[in-house]
Amino acid sequence: MSQVTEFNEYRQRMNATIMAADNKVIKRFFNLDTNTYAAGALDVKTKEMLGLACSMVLRCDDCIKYHVGKCFEEKLTDEEIYEVFAIANIIGGSIVIPHFRRAVEYWEILKAEAGSEARAGEQADLAAHKAAHGNEPAA
């Protein structure tokens, strides 16, 4: 199981367990967190970058993974993510560097998995084209 899948499945499973406890305060806090990252005066991409920088400064590895994943979903470029990393490092100092390394590792894993999925999709498209049209070149 990939690190990304393992992290996401664990998070979903534990969130379901937490929600099943039906604690009103916890549910409200989770709702507040969700709504904080919704589009408003700041777009979602900007909010996720802020969340990532703050998580790095606070040295919360699970939070960092979550926000790196969200930044990836928001289609940050390498240049953008590294600027966020730079801000977090300048604010947090050298103690952030180990968390920075893990953030970069997770970013690279996300990119590699997305590349594998894209290649698999392209291969499936090519196979479907060949099945439908033989060896005729794709348009």
Image (tube, rainbow, N blue to C red):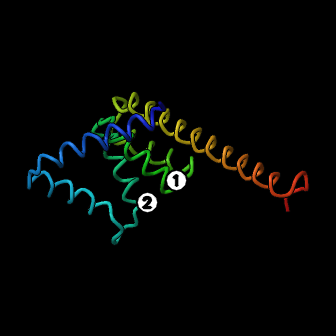
Give me the disc on residue 120.
none
Residue 122 placement (x, y as % from top left): 71, 49
Q: Residue at x 56, y 51 (%)?
A: 77
Which of the 4 image quadrants contains residue 56? top left
Residue 78 placement (x, y as % from top left): 56, 46
> Residue farthest to the left?
24
> Residue farthest to the right?
136
Q: Seen in the image, is 31 located left or right of residue 49?
A: left
Name the element at disc 2. helix
Q: Which residue is mark 2?
A: 45
Query: Is 27 located above or below residue 43 in the figure?
Result: above
The kind of residue on which mark 1 rests is: Leu
Q: Residue at x 31, y 41 (%)?
A: 11
Does the residue at mark 1 contact the one at mark 2 (Cβ under 8 Å)?
yes
Q: Which residue is mark 1?
A: 76
Depth order, front residue of 110/16: 16
| Mark 1 or mark 2, earlier in chain | 2
Query: Is 131 located above or below residue 1 in the figure?
Result: below
